[in-house]
Structure formats: structure tokens, C-alpha cells
Image: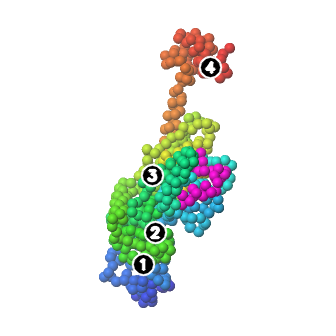
Amino acid sequence: MKSPSASEFDARAVIRHLPEKPGVYRMIDASGTVLYVGKARRLKRRVASYFNRSNRGSRIDAMVRQIRDIEITVTHTEAEALILENNLIKQHSPRYNVLLRDDKSYPFIVLSDHSDFPRLGFYRGSRRKGGRYFGPFPSATAVRNTLSHLQKVFPVRQCEDSFFRNRSRPCLQYQIERCTAPCVGYISPADYARDVSHAVKFLEGRSGEVIDELAAAMEKAAEALDFEQAARLRDRISSLRQIQEKQYISGEKGDLDVVACVHEGRQACVQVFYIRGGQNLGNRSYFPRIPEETDEDEVLTAFLARYYLGRQAPREILVNGAVPEKDLLEEALSRESGLQVSIRQRVRAERRRWLDMAVTNARAALAARLASHAGMQQRFEGLQQALSLAEVPERIECFDISHTAGEATVASCVVFDTEGARKSDYRRFNIRDITAGDDYAAMRQALTRRYKRLREGEGRLPDLLLIDGGRGQLKQAMEALEELQVTGVELVGIAKGPDRRPGEETLFRAGQEDVVILPPDSPALHLLQQVRDEAHRFAITGHRARRDKTRRTSRLEDVPGLGPKRRQILLKQFGGLRGISRAGVEDLASVKGISRELAQRVYDTFHDDGPAP
């Protein structure tokens, strides 16, 4: 239903025809822009309240002055209205609603429905495809960390099916003992199914059962004098216990989220801790955009609706503030999730401590955002929007190659997060055994060396990998990551424009044909330029140091028994290295202090065709 528009809005005429039924209303301005979306148990009464001057503040006053139309949608129940309200707010992003900017779907771990050798992998999106899903997880980082733990303890394959089907020999994951090579038949379906079963129990929070089964198998192997197998099982048990120590929450067994909201001025932070199967999967900070005169309870209530409607909610949500429409929100979440969802504020003992921790983290995150690094955070958020990423990246790594006509090739890797450059994580790679000047091979070698180490547990993967170059360099990065089976990392190539001037860069994304060109004043582009330029500087510095060291090193230093004094004598006698290289053995031996044997060694250093006749 839509009211007639008019240059001067006649609120009474519109309200007169509104029904006393549940539904959603939309406030519209003169340009047709949606100012506000709300839901009501009785539309007529709720909309009329906006035009009662005695009950509204300055924010409502400002909105009401702009209203030129009101649209409504009648629903059967208030819970349906709440769900529709959430969808419309996501669609229109009204100025006067509390908006959650980072509003993408949760990432999951999925176990494919492959008949003999299913894979575990990263997944985000609609769960309509076959397979079994575990999660949700708070971020891609949490998924990767969990998959990394699983691969060390239960070597279930994580490679893509296309990669799996076309193998004729085991890949790197088998060599580093992260996979049992089912692609080439190195493990039977029954043994593989056992590993899958253990991985599933771990993801379900039943790691205690897994440890008991592994302990029994270890004892059986020891009794059979298969000590090598017993040692492998012992190491698995040890790894599982270490994971339990890091992730297990005493006293909690089910799935729950802990949500805390703090508010200061026009800024608010909502901190969410995720507990799944008794395991702490980490936490995330959210900074919703809020209108003026919005208190913490309003922000918390709006966050719960914006965040959980349309997603899989846990059975229990702990909150640090009052939720005025708690019963209604529980009904809507329960309907969508297929579970009985409870929202609880008054908790004690262990749960009270977790709620206090969430509040502490929210305050710390808000203080950090209000500090000087807020600009960097905004750049990261701008990058998410500019590239349509699923979530705000928390860590960016960038690679660049530097050399002089193929000499002393060095690759650099720089790391940035929302705090800025993380120089302690920078790395350089001296590139060897490639054709001089082959930048593609250099890039592939650097990426392979870098992410092979990370796959072995020596660091953390980035959320976004930036490559200084165009489609060719990006292809090398894609192939290197595929060979290592690194997933969940966004790949972007950045190439300078035709005139190589800043502001004309072209962005290439893996798997997409269309390029992205950001405006010169884009904060996201400024961030990418900063990261790219830092990688370039770091690569050039390393290249120059390596090149200078090579050029300073004389081939005479490689001659056994030829010390600094004798080298100086030879250089003076023959006028430099070129003169020494042209001299015969007899000429060299005629120099004081140079024996014939030593002269022969000097001669051999400059001639590869054997001793002089």
C-alpha cells in the first residue's frame, strides 16, 4: 500500500487510512529516498506516534521534516514484519536506521559428499549444495586456523576436486605429512573414512571421544610391536590435547554467542565471541553506523536483528544489555534457524565471566578505533566495499620482484594490517635457479617458498594477497597457491597505468575478467598504493644490497690458501682481475709468495677447461 504523494505532506490523511495490523512502514523524502524503515504491531498507532510533537527528540524532528510519503506493507504477524524490516534495511541502508556495515554471510567448513574420499574446505554462501557444514565461524582466519589444526591431526584432503582428479603423483601436502594421498591410492577408503570420522567428531566438539579412540588404537599398535604407528598416534593425541588447551571452555558444551555493546558519542562497538561445540572459535568487533541520540540498548537490539536474521543463529545468545523486543526477536530467530533460540542477559559463574570479557574487549576495540589508527581501519573498510569482498580484510601481504637485467633477483613480501605495516613479518627471498630476468618464475618461486612455510605452521595466511603486476603475475600466484592448496585468500593484481602515474592503476581479481579502476581519491586505492610502494621499496633495498655484495666479492676470495695480502699483491702485479684472468700459471708463479701449486689454483678459478698445459 502506498499513500499519495504531495508537495506538503499531509500526515493526518495518511494515518487515517492505515490499518491496525502488523507490518512494516517506510518513510520517504522528496527525492524518493528511504529515510527510515520500521516495523509495528499496529501500523496506525506506531506511525501516528512520529507526528506527536511532545514525544519526539531532535533526531526524529529532523527526519519528520523531510517526510513526503509513507509506504507500508501489511504482514500476518509481527515476527514476519521483523524479518521484512531487516531485509528492507539491508536493501535501502536508510539514514536514520542503525546500520551494520560488515553484513556478509558467515564462513563455514564443509565436508563434501564425495563417496570415497570427501574433502574438507572453506565455504561461504548459501548452504544449498550437498555436503555437511560446520560452523558458522567468525572469520575466514578462524576457518583457516581450524583447517590447519585438522590437517596436522587428521590428514583429510583439502584440495579442490578438479585438482584431486588429475593427480598422477602425490602433491606437497603428502610430503609434509598433511595428507595421505588418496588421489593416487596411498590409503584405503576404510582408513580414510576413519580419519574423516575423527575430524567430524572434533568439529562437533567431541574431541574427548577421538582421544579415547586414538589411545586405544595406540595401545593395540604397541601390543602388535608396530611402534612406528604407535608413535604417530601418540603425536596425534598430543596435538589434540594442545588444541584443547587453547580452545576448550570449561563448563560450556553447547553452541552460543556472547554479544556485548559499548557506546561513546557517535561511535559504538559490538563485540561477538563465538562458542561452537564447547570451543572458542574467536571473536570479532563490529562498528555499526548509528544515528544521533541512540543508546546502547537500541544499538544492541538493532545489531541482533540485522546480524542474525537471515543467518544460522546459535541456540543461545548472551547479551550485556536489555533487549526490549526479546520475545519477538527470539521467535523470529527460532523460526529462521529451526532451533529454539534464547537471548539471555542475566547470567552467572562462567558465563558471567565471558560476558565481562566481551565487554572489556568491546571497550578496548572502541578505544583503538577512536585513536589514530581509525584512518587505517576506514581504508580497510573502503577496500572491502571497493572490491566487494565478503568481509573486511584483517591482513594484506604484497609481493614484488627487483633485479638489474636479471642480476641478483630479490622478491619482497610486506605485511599490513589495520594497525599499519607489520615490519616484523616482512620477508625477502633471494631468487635462484631461474632464467635471468624471468619475473614470472621469480614470483612463483617466492610465493611457493613463502606459503609452503605458512602451510607448515610457521605463520598465518593473509586475507588478501596483492601482487605488483598484471594478469601474468596474477596467474603465477593463482597456480602457486593451487599447488600448495591454499584457499580462502583473495588475490588481487595491481598494475600501473599507461603513463605509470599514481592514480591510474588497474586492479585485476583472480577468477574475474572485468578489471577494477578506482578513482584517484579513493581511500582503498591509497591503501593499495601504500602497500605496493612499500613492497617495491623493500624489494629494491634487498636487491641493491645483494647486487653490491656480489660485485664487491672478488673471485680470488674463492681460492683456497690465498689470503688478503697475496690477493693484493696479485692485483697490483697484474693491474686487476682482468690481468690475472689472462695470466698463465708460470706468470702467476713468478710473483713473490705465490707457489706453483697456488698459481695453479688461481688459474683454475678463472678457467673451466682444466689445468694449464
Asked whether the viewer can see residue 534, the reply is no
Asked whether the viewer can see residue 187, the reply is yes
Looking at the image, which is closer to me, 497 or 194? 194
Reply above or below: 397 against 88: above
**Mark 3: which amino acid?**
Gln
Q: Are marks 4 and 3 in contact (CB under 8 Å)?
A: no
Please tell me whether mark 3 sits on a helix, a strand or a loop. helix
In which quadrant of the rendered view does residue 245 lie? bottom left
Residue 134: in magenta span = no
**Mark 2: which amino acid?**
Pro
Compute the Cα span from label 4 to label 2: 75 Å
Q: Position of residue 177 (x, y in %)?
A: 57, 47
Reply above or below: 159 against 30: above
Q: Which residue is mark 2?
A: 314
Q: Which of the two marks, 3 or 1, is nearer to us in this view? A: 3
Looking at the image, which is closer to me, 587 or 311? 311
Residue drawn at 57 percent across, 64 percent down? 132
**Mark 4: which amino acid?**
Asp
Q: Which residue is mark 3?
A: 242
Please tell me whether mark 1 sits on a helix, a strand or a loop. helix
The region drawn magenta spans: 174-200
State the quadrant of the C terminus: top right
Compute the Cα span from label 1 to label 4: 89 Å
Residue drawn at 60 percent across, 61 percent down? 112
Q: Which residue is mark 4?
A: 604
Q: Which residue is mark 1?
A: 328
Whichever of callouts 4 and 2 sits on the residue coming sooner in the sequence is 2
Compute the Cα span from label 1 to label 2: 16 Å
**Badge 2: residue crowd in 10 Å (few <14, some 14–19, many ≥20):** many
Compute the Cα span from label 4 to label 3: 57 Å
Residue 176: in magenta span = yes
